[in-house]
Structures are given as structure tokens and as C-alpha cells.
Image (cartoon, grey):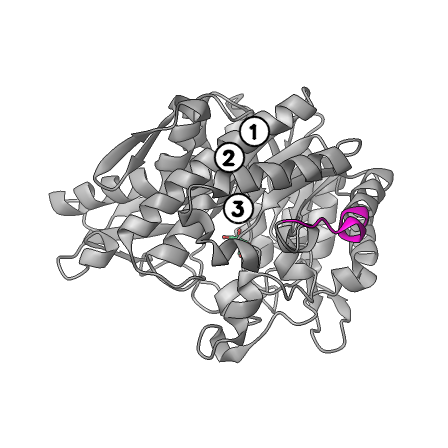
Amino acid sequence: MAQATFHFPRGFLWGTATAAHQVEGGNTNNNWYAWEQEPGRILNGEKSGLACDWWGGRWREDFQRAADGGQNTHRLSVEWSRIQPTPDRWDETALDRYLEMVRALTEMGMMPMVTLHHFSDPLWLMEKGGWENPAVAGYFETFVRRVVETLKDYVSMWCTINEPNVYATMGYVMGVFPPGKKDVAAYSRVTYNMVRGHAAAYRAIHALQPQARVGTAINYRSMVPAKGWFPPDHWVTRVQSALYNDAFARALQDGWVRLPLARKRVAEAKGTHDFIGVNYYTRDLVSFNLLKAGDLFSRRTYRSEAELSTTGFIANEPEGMFEAIKWARQFNVPIIITENGVEDPEDRLRPRYLAQHLQQVWRAVNFNWPVKGYYHWSLVDNFEWERGWSQRFGLWELNVETQARVKRASVDFFADVCRENGLSADMVARYAPEVFAQLFPN
Ligand code: FCB
């Protein structure tokens, strides 16, 4: 057996990521709460309810679990609808609560990374047209200023918008996130305004905190033409990947938003990322399909041999992680894996998924590519949007009724990685022996 350790650079960030609506509970003033009340919107009619009861105070015990697990950072988000319940009111208690949370993280030895927008929007904003309304960039900037003024003694890593590409695609093309539209023109408006909102936030944060590091988290899907010999599959893969993976990050690089059938200038967005956050989960096979005009003539599937997660949501394709990092290099800024993980209530696939994906991150690090950290999604099982509680992404299992946390084997595995700042042959032999020979060949 080969004995080796895949070491990571000194100071590498190891943590988990969460999002306010998914963990806090009781967020009744946002578009997701309203969506959960509509029949047929969430699988099995489930609701976020108390979620992980962070707003009831359980954030502290979960942060302790992360700290005990050797993590040196945590990525969390703040809920706009709590902080600014109506356009003319700030909720100081909510701001104080977030301050308490980021202070506690710091005291526990975990650097907070704060996401300012993670899918959920205040109801008042949606009444004004949400991200379709050009005024949203200004509203977002005002909100961001208030948050940064409050948290800046403890936070200097900011993620403005989580997965703008998922938000726009799911809410405005697929219609499965609120507001449930299938309208490419609306999708384009939302994407354009999110670029403007990000740019406004970037400048506001730097004005308040010159040393801040500001970026976004892009959902990168690896895409491969389904039939290598069929030019239309290549063409549609290129088009899809350019829109889905590239458009947002390129806009922050050069100030041009490339939308379906149009290009729009947002001069103030040029050069507005200090790092690029990459959320990588899986890889798609893309084929050209004339019947799918609404999906820009494409159909996505997984390789038939691929190993799938419990509900079939994710195919385990670790090489896509390497490809995602390679892709992110074009932006010439530090790269952070802001999310990666798999839904797996029984924790059968997660250990090897984790080992295989970390090996790919390590490969990239070995080329001296500037990867600075890895956040696993997620710390504890949480409310998985339109898929409700059917998908379990936590290192820790959550019993939603009793709020009990139950340790999965992956908790100890990830803790070993964080403490060692590396992935060793011993760890793989212990937690994911089935991929040992693949990861550590003789
Ligand atoms: C990402 C989201 C995150 C969670 C994971 C599984 O797209 O950012 O909130 O839903 O997927």
C-alpha cells in the first residue's frame, strides 16, 4: 500500500458553508417562506419551519461542532428580510444577533466569510419586482452598507451574491424557485441587475473597509457534449457553458454581461472581484434537442455509468472539480471552493466523494494554482429549497422534529483532514477504503 499525504499550503481555509434561510428557521418575511405556503412548490409540501433552529439559538452549538472538528473558517449568510423588514426600517436586534454570531466564530478560531445574498429576498423587494427592477442595485447597496458597518470588526471576507446563475436560471427559466417564471427576457434582466448590484456592493464594501476581500460564489457545472462525434452537441455545450458558467464571472472581469442574444455594458463592474468562489457539485452530459427551445435547445443528463446520490441529484464526478479550478484560473484572482458536497442520508457515498474531490483540489494546488480554501456543503442537514428535507447534505445528521444532531462518519473524516491540513492514506484507508487503490496507487 502506498503511504502518502496530500498536503495543502499553510493557512489553507477549511470550513463548512450554510445559508440563512436553510438553517435559521422562522424566516417568515421572505419570498421563500411565501413560496413554501403555495401548494405544489416544495417536494412533499415540506416547509423550512424551524430549520436548524439557529434563530432559536442553536447556531452556537453547531459552531462549536465545527470548531471541535478542526475547521478554521465558516461561511454563513445574513438574511436581508430580517435586517431590513421594510424599506424604511432596520432591525437592530437582528443586526446584533449576526454580530454576536461572527464574534463567536472569531473567538472559536473560525474566520467568518459572510454571504450577503443567498437566494432569499425580502417580500417588500419582490413586491417592487425583485431583481428585475433596475432600482434593486441601489437597494442592495444600502443593505450591504448597513451590514458591513455592523460586522466589519469581525468580517473582511465577503461573498456578495451566492450563485447568481442558479438564482436566475431556477427562478426565471426553469420556474422552480420563486417567482416561478419561464421567461428568458426576465432572466436577462435579473442577471444584468445582479451584475450591477454586485458592482455597487463591491465598491461600497471597499469604501467602508479598504482591506476587504470581496467576491461571489459561482455554481460551476462541468459540461461535456453527450455525443463526442456530433457537432450540434458541441455547439450547444459551448453555448450553455458560456451562459451558465462564464457570463457572471466574465462580467466582473471586463464589465460586459453576455446575455442570450445580447451583450450589455456595465462599466462599473469591471475588475470587481478579489477572489472567485466556486461551488462545484457535478458534471452534465449535454445534448442538442430541438424540442427544448425553452432550455436553449439542450438536454442534460448524467453519464449512464456515473454513481448517483440518493435522489439522483448529483453524479459523483470528481474530475469536474479539477476542471472547475482550471476554469477559474482565467480570472487571475485567488480561488476558493465555496461549496462542494453531496446529499447522502446514510453517509455511504459522502466519504469517498469527499476524498476524491479533495484529491482533485490538491492536484490543482500542486500546480501552484491559487486555491486558498475549501468549504464543505454543509455542516448540518438543512432545508434544501424546492427539494425540502428530501436531501441531506450535512456532515451532521439533523432530526428535524427533535432537533437532535447525530454524528455521521464524515464528521470525523473531515475533522482529520482539517487538523492535518491534508488528506492522508491512513484517512482514506479508514473512511473510504473502496477508493484507496485509486487515490494511492502502488
Ligand atoms: C447550492 C446552493 C446551496 C445548497 C447546495 C446543495 O446550489 O448554493 O444553498 O442548496 O446547492
Dividing the picture into quadrants, the one containing residue 392 is bottom right
As measured in the structure, the alpha-carbon distance from the residue carrying label 1 to the one carrying label 2 is 6 Å
- 348 horizontally vs 292: left or right: right
Mark 3 Cα-neighbour bin, 10 Å: few <14, some 14–19, many ≥20: many
Q: Nearer the viewer, mark 1 or mark 3?
A: 1
When the figure is inspected, residue 353 is found, relative to residue 99, above or below; the finding is: below
Q: Which residue is mark 2?
A: 198
When the figure is inspected, residue 45 is found, relative to residue 14, above or below; the finding is: below
Q: Nearer the viewer, mark 3 or mark 2?
A: 2
Instruction: Determine the residue positioned at 83% across, 52% down.
Output: 64
Instruction: Determine the residue positioned at 25% across, 42% down.
Output: 260
Q: Which residue is mark 3?
A: 356
Q: Which residue is mark 1?
A: 202
Residue 422 location (% of width, % of height): 67, 36
Is the CB of mark 1 within 8 Å of ligand 1? Answer: no
CB within 8 Å, label 1 to label 2: yes
Type of amino acid under label 3: Gln
The answer to whether residue 31 is visible is yes
Instruction: Please tell me which residue lies in front, 206 or 315.
Output: 206
Q: Which comes before the other along the chain, label 1 or label 3?
A: 1
Type of amino acid under label 1: Tyr
